[in-house]
Image (cartoon, rainbow, N blue to C red):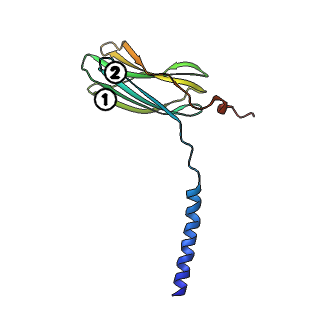
Amino acid sequence: MRFKHTLAAACATAVAALIVPLAATPAAAAVPTTGDSVTAGDFSFSGSFEIGWRADKLDPVKITLRDQRTDGYAVGARLVTGGANGKITWRMRTIPSGQDTASWTTYAAPGGWISYAYFEVCKVNVSNGAVSYCHTTRVMNNPISDEDNVPFPG
């Protein structure tokens, strides 16, 4: 009986020795995020957005669009970023035909520091693809300090 008790205690100690370091390991740092939404004045369409900021890319970029009207126009959104590589207007994503909502999770990697980002939510003419008008979110500035983005010398 004493042997079983000692063996069980030894096993418990070994398992604890493995589990405690795993629990004490610091988790990966959380990615700072910003977000915003926009709704047309007549409530015909809306979009909501969330950006995960990293040193040289936005990841993840979450986009959700909603079209409230069947009016011959599609609703689309595009990301606009500015930073080390200038202002970049990313491709428009539109709600697929026959749907009133759509969501995407993507990323943006322009190849350098990103200072700011915002989204344009636009009405797009279905017959010719022309952008009729857009509403913009607020400008979301990079929450990561530019001083933290110093390249390794070497």
Q: Position of residue 44 (x, y in %)?
A: 29, 20
Query: Mark 2 and mark 1: span between their CA atoms?
Result: 9 Å
Residue 33 appears left or right of 55: left
Q: Which residue is labeled 2 in the image?
A: 75
Residue 130, placed above or below residue 141 = above
Query: Which is nearer the eye, 105 or 52?
Result: 52
Which disc number belongs to residue 101? 1
**Which of the 4 image quadrants contains residue 38?**
top left
Q: What is the crowding at mark 1: few (fewer than 14 residues within 10 Å), some, or many (at least 20)?
A: some
**Mark before the other along the chain sequence, 2 or 1:** 2
Q: Residue drawn 34% across and 24% down?
A: 46
Q: Is residue 3 left or right of residue 76?
A: right
Q: For the point 34% across and 21% down, which residue is it?
A: 75
Q: Residues within 10 Å of mark 2 (few under 14, many from 20)?
A: many
**Residue that protrudes farthest toward the bottom in the picture:** 1
Find residue 133 and report its image quarter.
top left
Q: Is residue 104 left or right of residue 152?
A: left
Q: Which residue is located at x 60 percent, y 21 percent?
A: 85
Amino acid type indicated by mark 1: Thr
Residue sitting at x 43%, y 27%: 36
Specify the quadrant that holds the C terminus.
top right
How far across and how far down the image is residue 1, in percent? 51, 87
Give the number of the disc on residue 68: none
54 vs 139, nearest the viewer? 139
**Where residue 123 sits: x, y (%)?**
34, 16
Q: Is residue 153 above or below residue 127?
A: below
